[in-house]
Image (tube, rainbow, N blue to C red):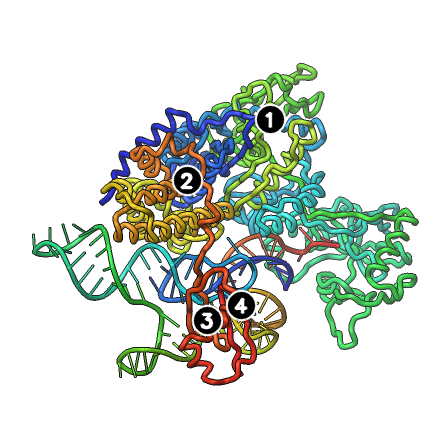
Amino acid sequence: MTYDHKAIEAKWQDRWESEGVFHAVEDVTRPKFYNVAMYPYPSGELHLGHVRNYTYIDLITRYKMMQGFNVLSPMGWDSFGLPAENLAIETGIHPRISVENQITKMKGHFRQLGVAFDWSRELASHDPAYYRWDQWLFLELYDRGLAYKATAPVNWCPKDQTVLANEQVVDGACERCGTVVEKRSLAQWFFRITDYADRLLDDLAALDDWPDRVRTMQRNWIGRSEGARFRISVEGTSETFEVFTTRPDTIFGMTFCVLAPEHPLVEKLIEGGENEDEARDYIVRAGRESEIERMAEGDKTGVFTGKFALNPVNGKPVPIWIADYVLMSYGTGAIMAVPGQDQRDWDFATKYGLDIIRTVQPPAEWEGEAFLGEGQTVNSEFLDGLDREGAKERILVWLEEQGIGERAIQYRLRDWLISRQRYWGCPIPMIDCPECGLVPVPRDQLPVELPDVDDYAPQGRSPLAAVEEWVATTCPDCGGAARRETDTMDTFVDSSWYFFRYTDPHNDQAIFDPDKADYWMPLDQYIGGVEHAILHLLYARFITKFLHDIGLSTVDEPFLRMFTQGMLVKDGAKMSKSKGNVVPPDRYYRDFGADALRLFELFVGPPTDDAVWNDSGVPGTKRFLDRIWKMGTTDPGFVDREPNDDDDRLLAETHRTLKRVTEDIDRFHFNTTVSSLMSLANLFQEYLAGSPREKTFAEAYRIMILMLAPAAPHVTHELWELREMGPMLATEPWPEWDSSLVAESTVTMVVQVNGKVRDRVDVPADISAEQAEELALALEKVQGWINGAVVRKVIARPPNVINFVVG
RNA sequence: GCCGGAGUGGAGAAAUUGGUAAACUCGAUGGACUCAAAAUCCAUUGCUCGAGAGGGCUUGCGGGUUCGAGUCCCGCCUCCGGCACCA
């Protein structure tokens, strides 16, 4: 017996839409619940991996709604970006057209899955009505000095012909296409996220409902180091350079200094020197190599500048070297090298025959290598005898007194490089005027719309640069001829604030109404892939803090509770379009229905873990739904009799299941939610096979339908209506369990002898230790195992277990 | 190298606090129904010794704590993820 899933599912999808069941309106009389799944890139296909995520978000939406919350669950599109643009290069079709087609397709998929979204708030980042506010946000950042243009060595992807943010370089390669990135020195736009490094780090501590691994990843990414920054002068000149160190206590062990090849002082140091040619040669080579190539060589390389630096503590001259193991992008691009206490400096010193002075006393048996452990400070004049912390404190005070340096905190986090030399993104709203310099586009001229181009192919500059009539403009300040910025923004700018826009998606006067944002923010639940643990989640936190600082948001953390779901794996790889192993859900909709598919995706394993797709699972969950359907539709009527033990047990088990299911949903154990419901259905089946059904069954069945509703909404809505159990199920309150029914009256007690299970016996739940012992000792098997020996000890944990220790 | 997480039957897995290891589902085997098949229903299904009654073993490996360990502690192995010349 099977139900007509096609007809039923289509019917309820229509009803939910036409009755606006999931349309959310601010309502101060009810607690709100803001529930968001990360907005997807509109790839056109919703595959089984996506289905898993959206089933989770939908289950929560429906469950919270039944619990009486005013739930907002919106959906939108991360529609700018490279995939659409690359498709345009291939086909010549404008990305807007392909993206909008794909959005239509995907909306159809969401509908077929029965996901409860509030479509009235739909947004798309490629829509000028949306990206206008990206540009506005950019200008707000610019006004406060948090958006700036600077020339710096940047990561360049030669395949995609664009720069990449630090976060988008994985193992030295482009995150998108896997091409090894090159270093290039280019003038680019940055957001000064490093200004927020401290807050981004400190506030992680309060995000208790985030997965620990995500918080750890962010903490490591921000990478806070405490130490000192101080100036070192170059012997025989008036030049100085600055270094950062976490070990100022080892300053007496500085036997040389190293500058990054890109360091601005390098040119002055080598010019006219004995080593000039060799040094120039080295700098050119280092500049050509990617970071991977540098590291692949293994061996550290460098070249002597010919100049000496003076150690500020004792005036001793030490050679200044250039080496690419010092990075221009971290700290000051220059270091004091202390080979005695730093392995990298040790390697370099031994290779080039430089001095090594130990300033921390290693253990007696210590041989070779830098010593990084704790020990007494030695060879360090006024620091001698102090431990690490004592020496650190002492030298910091000394450096500050001398006016040479100060305490400093250094972050691994770099500023966020947001410009891209690509077409399909939000134009940066700036104008370059030969007279006035960089001038922001006045806010009343926003949006700066993306013009059409003939050729999307990247050529090392944005395709926009070829659109002369667009680039040529007038300066808003002086009215003279000027040119527009042709780079577009990283799409992570679009996604760093879209959850604010959902709260007021149609506002054309402001980015959003702060009162509306105040009602909905922060998100009560955010769900997405762990691959966004650093990029998107860090950027979104940064922009939220900024919106807070300029008075638009009352919250400075956007996501109260974060959930990262596992991936769906097939043929040993994550299910994704780029891996070519996606399974579209269509066949499952057709053969088994969305409810069966949803149920299996919930059942397949713990939501946080990766799950392996198994094709025979969906028929299994469909069988389960068919059984539920059969129980509810083939009704022989109820016999009029007093409830018996079977009825009592049925109701009690139903309430126990209700408790378990409620708690499991609350802690995101959706797989056991489903298995509990299956177990209960098995009991129903057993009950129905026994004595004729009494009206207790109707109550148990009603609770079953309510519990199943968030997971399998279509078939449960139909049953609810068919059996005339009430108005629309979606808005029915979540049931509450009766604790007197949940409590067990009889428990199976395990009887152990020397820790081994020897028998089991049913006992009253409130049995005393004495009674339990008496009862257990009387058991034949137990007697057999004790066999006359002395019982030395009895551990009774009634009513669960009793253990006789025999000697 | 550093920082996380994981390892349980043929498969996915379960076991909120240290108290019946393997719930639930898939798969497999046998049976009922059927002319037959599908569907459905019933039974068996961790390994092992035993004709049976029943016993022994079992949560990556080796130790430990405990009356009792998948769960806690110590030492390993393997896999996955993140970071990685970050001074």
Q: Give x and y (percent) for residue A405.
A: 85, 48
Residue A72 visible, this angle: yes
Disc 4/disc 2 C-alpha distance (Å): 43 Å
Q: Residue at x 27, y 36 (%)?
A: A6
> In the rendered structure, which amino acid carries the disc numbered 3?
Leu
Do the residues bearing badges 4 and 1 touch, measured as CB atoms within 8 Å?
no
Residue A693 in the figure: left or right of residue A214:
left
Q: Chain of mark 3?
A: A
Do the residues bearing badges 2 and 1 touch, measured as CB atoms within 8 Å?
no
Mark 4 and mark 1 lie on one chain; the one further toward the N terminus is: 1
Do the residues bearing badges 4 and 3 touch, measured as CB atoms within 8 Å?
no
Where residue A465 sits, quadrant-wise, is: top right
Q: Residue at x 45, y 47 (%)?
A: A661
Give the residue pinned by disc 4.
A769
Do the residues bearing badges 2 and 3 touch, measured as CB atoms within 8 Å?
no
- Checking the image for residue A775, the label placed there is 3
Q: Are marks 2 and 3 on the same chain?
A: yes
Q: Residue at x 50, y 75 (%)?
A: A755
Mark 3 and mark 1 lie on one chain; the one further toward the N terminus is: 1
Give the residue pinned by disc 1.
A135
Mark 2 and mark 3 lie on one chain; the one further toward the N terminus is: 2
Give the residue pinned by disc 2.
A710
In the displayed structure, B74 sits above or below A262; it is below
Mark 3, residues whose alpha carbon is within 10 Å: few (<14), some, or many (≥20)? few
> In the rendered structure, which amino acid carries the disc numbered 1?
Gln
Residue B25 in the figure: left or right of residue A21:
left
